Amino acid sequence: MRGRRHLGFVAAAATLLAAAPMSTIYDRWTWLVQCAVVVGLIAGAATLTRWWRAPVWAQGLSMVAALLLGLTWIFPSGQELVSLLPTPGTLTHFGSLLASSGEDMRSYGVPVQDLDSLLFITALGVGGVAIVVDLLTVGMRRPALAGLPMLAIYSVPVAVHVDSVSAVPFVIGAVGFLWLLAADNVDRVRHFGRRFTGDGRDVDVWEPSPLAAAGRRLAVIGVAVAVLLPLAVPGMTSGLLSQLGTGGGGEGNGRPGQGGSPGRVNLFAQLSGELNRSEQRDMVKVTTNDPDPFYLRFAVADDFGRTGFGPRSPEGAPVTQGLPDPRDMSREQNAGITRTQYQAEVEIVDFAMPFLPVYTAPVSTRNVDGNWRYDPTMQVLYSERASSRNKKYSFEFVRSEYTPAALAAAPQLAPEHAFRKLYTTVEPVREVEELVGRLTTGKRNDYDRVRAIYDHFSRKNGFSYALNTEGGTSGQDIVNFLTNKVGFCQQYAAAMTWLVREAGVPARVAFGFTSANRSSNTYTLTNNNLHAWTEVYFTGIGWVPFDPTPAASITGSWRSEWAPDPDAPEQSPTAPSASAGPTADPSAGAESPDGAERPLDEAFDGGAGIAPDSGPRWPLWVVAVAVLLVLLLTVPALRRVLLRRRRQVRAAAAASTLASVTADGDVPPGVARVVLSDSELARARADAHAAWDELVDTLVDFRVRVDPAETPRATADRLVREGLTAGTADEAVRLLGHAEERARYAREPLRHGPLADALRSVRRALSAGADRRTRLVAATLPPSVLYRWRLAAMDLSAGFVGFTGRFRDRLLRWSPRRVLANRPSR
């Protein structure tokens, strides 16, 4: 028992070591302190119940109770009894934390601050893993299986990080797993007493045998290979080999960094997470000779799915092979369009993404190696192997200016064009269809339709930019936003894109930085300058930007001649056209502190997709889990009922056969009737065995001692002698014992009466003599069924161990060491 307690503490420590990768998600170490408290309470509860020699299921319940108490203590709702015992209000509070954790996970970027919702789900997850690891290691003595839940913790940072996750936390978790295996091995060896080597020398318990030493060396080598191989192989990460060469033409600049997959980056979550940071931090510095630059752009969300707008995987050629030039378009399509070439230099201060921020339409790059590619359709610079972290590069770009007449003259996109299928897909929503139909009625070209939708997002129509948004009751985020008319840049960009697509015009959401914080020709862009807008495709022209977010609320907001500010005062016909430039002074310095306190974009998180109502849905999950648990708990009882019914049917059939034969042969009641045919002999024995098996299971269910060494008659006499049966039950149990005895040992089986009635009589007697708890357990969790399942699991495990042993022995036949040892000497 002492060794098992020791293993319990080792399992708890190994769980905390396996949680080391969570350090890459949080800014601080609050999560570790809370997880240590929860895991410590779980380990203490498990140790206490084992000291009382409680069964495994009681140990599991005690650990769940300890987890609940720990969470109640760390995350109180204020409605607890004596500030510790949970109440229904506590569970409601936990449900609200779970509901808000889903929104926070989608809205905040890593590393994240200490939010109660995320800390709660972390402590809950690590505590749940600690319970599973303890049960597998100490309860079932299968510590190798504990590696699976421990590995599940490591999968969390792998899923949320854009960059590759550091190998150091994985090594720490692997050390904890190896410690757990070694501790279990030592505990098992202790039970064998003294150990000796092949030459008879006594071996200390901590000294490994040659086989154990070889196994440990192989385990260490395996972990080292699993950690170092991804760092060394190009393509898996931008690791050691990638740092020795650029892998392509062009001049490299610094370490490539760790990249991610551009197609799986949640752009909306990254944007919301940065906007919701409490502190302002510099991200990008850009110097350009463009006197009035547009937004610095790095990604687009052009794929519409059930979760809303998201990025598709870009496709392109390395930038070292050259970039397309929009000025190569035919001259007849350039009427009313001016294209001017500028240059820019970019320094990444704190921006780690698989994208490089550039202005629209770059035509050449410098200090960008062959790891980076350019997608001419999405107009993004991306990489599958590298990150933008600490990059310095420069590029030349072509800035395009359009007149409204040029856009209005653009022909409508052909119905069979691929862009119409790719960039006009949305989910049908009746309210959106009605609004778009009302706005575009009578519009003769795509530009007029787009302008009608663009002008709709104005203050005179009730739209405003606010720090906090309101939920809705429609169950659809797009409808809630169009009804409340309050939101952030993500909501405006996604909503306009949706409406433009509904009008049959290709559109997508673009992401970048507004031009602000200017000093000479250099712009210092912070996390508060992150922005989203809409890009619309016009045939023969390309993608044209429209920013529907209220200009007065965005520092560095840019407006153009083709997309002027709908809230600006109307000008006389003789007045100059609307200025195409930032609406705020770019040299005004840093933004106001309010920008750093923007809450997350609630309505269009992950994209303006269809989502259920924002109300908490955790009670549905609780009910579903409860129903599932009830169904699982009824499986043993259902199995017992079916087995009893099948046995009673056989006994009843045998009794009816006996009655018919007795009537035909005038055999008086109570006199032995001999079955003559072989089929009747086999059936009579099977019926007697079934009735006896049912009696034995009934005894096990009601916790009556069953001695396999006793004969059936001796068992029946003992039950009568101990007073477990009375009255007719005494005759019934003797009848069952006599029938089983004849079926086992006699040449011909014997029936003395209806066995089904005898079984029912004995069961009623045993139930009457048992206490309430025994009757409840016999009805809901029959011990006979659980015992059979445990034996089956042990047999399956033993069979698997035997199979692996035989397989290992066959592999050892081809061991190089054995082959070399058997080589004849020269």
Image (tube, grey):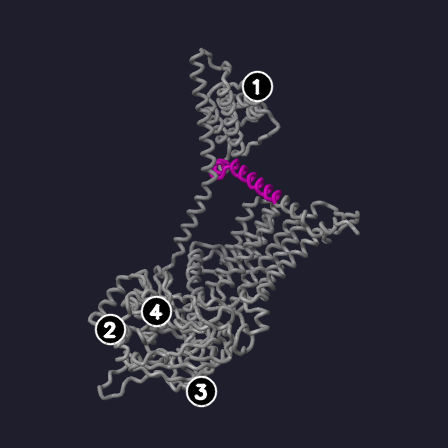
> In the figure, residue 377 lies in which quadrant?
bottom left
Q: Amino acid at mark 1?
A: Ala
Q: Tell me the residue that label 2 is attached to.
A: 445
Front residue of this view, candidates 81 and 518: 518
Q: Determine which of the numbered discs, if any, sits on residue 746 in the image.
A: 1
In the picture, measured across the screen, residue 41 lies left or right of residue 568, that is right
Which secondary structure lies at badge 4? Answer: helix
Assess disc 4: are there few (<14), some (14-19) or many (≥20) residues with their C-alpha within 10 Å of its C-alpha.
many
**x and y percentages locating residue 756 in the rendered image:** 46, 25
Which secondary structure lies at badge 1? Answer: loop
Among the two numbered marks 2 and 3 on one chain, the one whose residue lies closer to the N terminus: 2
Pointers 2 and 1 in contact (C-beta within 8 Å): no
Residues drawn in magenta: 774-803
Query: Is residue 113 something one can see in this rendering?
Result: no
Front residue of this view, candidates 485 and 358: 358
**x and y percentages locating residue 453 in the rendered image:** 27, 72
Q: Is residue 276 above or below residue 95?
A: below
Q: CA distance from mark 4 to mark 3?
A: 32 Å
Q: CA distance from mark 2 to mark 1?
A: 100 Å
**x and y percentages locating residue 261 in the rendered image:** 47, 66
Q: Amino acid at mark 2?
A: Asn
